[in-house]
Image (cartoon, rainbow, N blue to C red):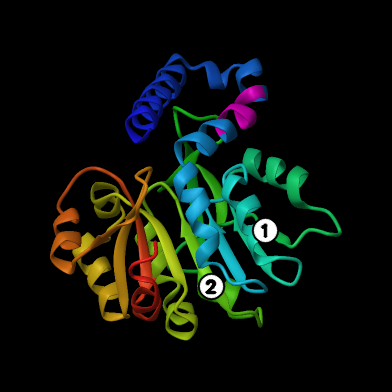
């Protein structure tokens, strides 16, 4: 079953990539159907991750979805925290903001949408278009201006404990984590972050130093993916990943959770 899913995952990823290369998603019809196609793509390729994350979320807590895109993870988080909890969906892209607003902005929603780019400073940032996606942008020295905010600024003003932070921001994940130092110290949330050493270096973040910061903050590391079980990593192994070029979904668990649940995930 796992092998079958692996090959389907591989085929679908490559089909999506090839469609992106053709420029289809930049056409009027491509832009129209992109949110639906992208959501279905994410639901399949990241199914295991989406199923595992709710177990780390406490009912009534605060979850931050940083790089919310079209809201695939946001919806999962909204259901997990329940009506007394709250989700902050942080997204800088104007196309994605419209999609998120249409999905979640109603009187009964426990989702707050923030049009901004999370970083390590509260300052103006700039976005440029991702050539493969009509609703994908990344931080640059020029382009579309957007408000930069820190997780500390957003979360510490809300008197709800943070149980999980998910980060997928096209390479500036390290900046986001450094902008969440106070939240990490106060609440010790589970952190799911995309980890791509080459991209981190592009934005001035040393991957080894980032892992060292999380390690010293009392976190253990695992890799999330489409395998039946989450792979636990020793510190030696995770530091080796900092020298690789490929991307992993890195799950950072507070050591208290690691001890309580080391054999059940």
Question: Tag 2's secondary structure?
Answer: strand
Residue where numbered disc 1 is placed:
78
Query: Viewer-proximal residue, 240 or 141?
Result: 240
Query: Which numbered tag is attached to residue 163?
Result: 2
Q: Is residue 206 visible to the viewer in this orientation of the structure?
A: no
Q: Quadrant of the rendered structure where residue 210 is?
A: bottom left
Q: Position of residue 107 (x, y in %)?
A: 86, 59
Q: Quadrant of the N terminus?
A: top left
Q: Position of residue 41 (x, y in %)?
A: 52, 31
Residue 34 falls inside the magenta stretch: yes
Q: Residue at x 20, y 61 (%)?
A: 238
Mark 2 crowdedness (10 Å alpha carbons): few <14, some 14-19, many ≥20: many
Question: In this image, 194 relative to 33: left or right?
Answer: left
Q: Position of residue 141 (x, y in %)?
A: 40, 48
21 over 112 or under it: above or below: above
Query: Which numbered tag is attached to residue 158?
Result: none
Question: Tag 1's secondary structure?
Answer: helix
Mark 1 crowdedness (10 Å alpha carbons): few <14, some 14-19, many ≥20: many
Q: CA distance from mark 2 to mark 1?
A: 13 Å
For marks 2 and 1 on the same chain, the one whose residue lies earlier in the sequence: 1
Residue 81 falls inside the magenta stretch: no
Question: Would you say the magenta stretch is mainly helix, strand or loop?
Answer: helix
Q: In this view, which residue lies farthest toward the right?
A: 107
Question: In this image, 158 relative to 235: left or right?
Answer: right
Q: Position of residue 66 (x, y in %)?
A: 52, 57
Q: Is residue 22 visible to the viewer in this orientation of the structure?
A: yes
Q: What's the magenta region?
A: 33-38
161 over 50 or under it: above or below: below
């Amino acid at each position: 079953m796992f092998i079958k899913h692996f090959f389907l995952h591989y085929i679908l990823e490559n089909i999506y990539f090839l469609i992106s290369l053709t420029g289809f998603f930049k056409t009027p019809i491509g832009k129209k159907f992109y949110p639906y196609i992208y959501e279905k793509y994410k639901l399949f390729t990241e199914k295991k991750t989406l199923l595992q994350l709710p177990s780390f979320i406490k009912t009534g807590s605060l979850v931050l979805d940083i790089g919310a895109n079209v809201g695939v993870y946001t919806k999962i988080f909204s259901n997990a925290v329940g009506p007394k909890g709250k989700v902050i969906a942080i997204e800088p892209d104007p196309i994605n903001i419209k999609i998120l607003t249409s999905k979640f902005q109603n009187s009964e929603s426990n989702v707050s949408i923030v049009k901004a780019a999370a970083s390590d400073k509260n300052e103006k940032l700039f976005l440029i278009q991702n050539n493969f996606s009509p609703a994908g942008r990344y931080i640059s020295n020029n382009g579309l201006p957007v408000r930069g905010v820190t997780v500390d600024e957003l979360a510490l003003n809300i008197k709800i404990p943070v149980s999980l932070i998910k980060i997928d921001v096209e390479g500036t994940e390290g900046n986001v984590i450094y902008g969440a130092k106070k939240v990490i110290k106060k609440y010790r949330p589970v952190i799911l972050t995309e980890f791509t050493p080459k991209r981190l270096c592009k934005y001035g973040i040393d991957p080894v130093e980032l892992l060292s910061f999380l390690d010293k903050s009392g976190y253990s590391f695992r890799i999330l993916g489409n395998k039946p079980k989450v792979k636990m990593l020793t510190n030696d192994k995770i530091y080796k990943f900092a020298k690789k070029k490929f991307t992993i979904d890195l799950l950072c668990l507070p050591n208290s959770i690691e001890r309580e649940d080391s054999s059940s995930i």
